[in-house]
Image (spheres, grey):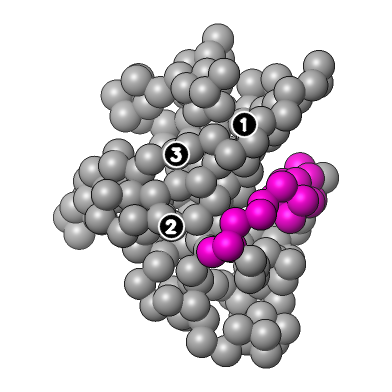
């Protein structure tokens, strides 16, 4: 029952998220967009980079910029803080959303950011078999975010310490996804 209320709250909370394009690069093989995101309850929260390689999946890395604030992760979908999301689509209709929480090189992360909230990160003490190592698209997301972001609030970034991801949530519910359209995400 608690899980149900958490999911309902999270969906309601996420529905008030607002995204604004900062920069879009379109090529024949992919579109890359950098967007800022905010919510009505929290104000400016961070940025996300999106990569659509036109193969029925959109990958994004949403960076929680104020990650040393103990409440900042509340401003992100499912309260995950910095996260990766994969949207699967068919004919421009989103058919699934999968969320991943990053796993960090914790020693290096805590050395550079000692005030980081424990809710913001997983570390390598979790069971190793659950960790999905970085792949080519993850490296592309991190590289593009690093190159494209010029935000004052995002000048510090914990993403350099990401070593992998752990699957967190998956939404396959057609009713929840019915209104979502691939073109609206990138605002083409």
Mark seen at residue 58 = 1
- Residue under label 3, please give it: 19
Q: CA distance from mark 2 to mark 1?
A: 21 Å
Residue 85 visible in rendering: no
Q: Decide: few, some or many residues near mark 2? Use Cα within 10 Å; few <14, some 14-19, many ≥20.
A: many
- Residue under label 2, please give it: 45
Residue 158: x and y in percent read 64, 70
Q: Quadrant of the N terminus?
A: bottom left
Q: Is residue 2 above or below residue 177?
A: below
Q: Residue at x 41, y 65 (%)?
A: 73
Residue 43: x and y in percent read 34, 56
Q: Earlier in the sequence, mark 3 or mark 2?
A: 3
Q: Is residue 111 above or below residue 3?
A: below
Q: Quadrant of the C terminus?
A: top right
Q: Earlier in the sequence, mark 2 or mark 1?
A: 2
- In magenta segment, residue 175: no
Q: Which residues are magenta?
A: 137-154
**Does 31 sit left or right of 58 as displayed?**
right
Residue 72: x and y in percent read 40, 67
Cβ atoms under marks 1 and 3 closer than 8 Å: no
């Amino acid at each position: 029952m608690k899980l149900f209320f958490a999911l309902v709250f999270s969906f309601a909370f996420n529905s008030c998220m607002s995204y604004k394009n900062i920069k879009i690069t379109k090529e024949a093989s992919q579109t890359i967009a950098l967007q800022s995101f905010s919510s009505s309850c929290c104000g400016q929260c961070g940025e996300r980079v999106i990569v659509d390689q036109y193969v029925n999946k959109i990958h994004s890395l949403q960076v929680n910029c104020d990650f040393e604030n103990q409440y900042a992760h509340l401003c992100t979908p499912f309260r995950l803080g910095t996260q990766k999301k994969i949207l699967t689509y068919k004919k421009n209709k989103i058919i699934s959303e999968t969320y991943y929480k990053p796993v960090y090189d914790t020693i290096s992360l805590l050395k550079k950011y000692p005030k980081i909230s424990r809710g913001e990160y997983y570390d390598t003490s979790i069971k190793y078999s659950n960790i999905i190592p970085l792949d080519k698209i993850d490296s592309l997301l991190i590289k593009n975010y690093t190159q494209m972001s010029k935000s004052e609030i995002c000048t510090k970034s914990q993403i350099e310490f990401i070593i992998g991801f752990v699957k967190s949530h998956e939404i396959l519910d057609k009713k929840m996804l019915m209104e979502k359209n691939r073109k609206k995400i990138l605002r083409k």
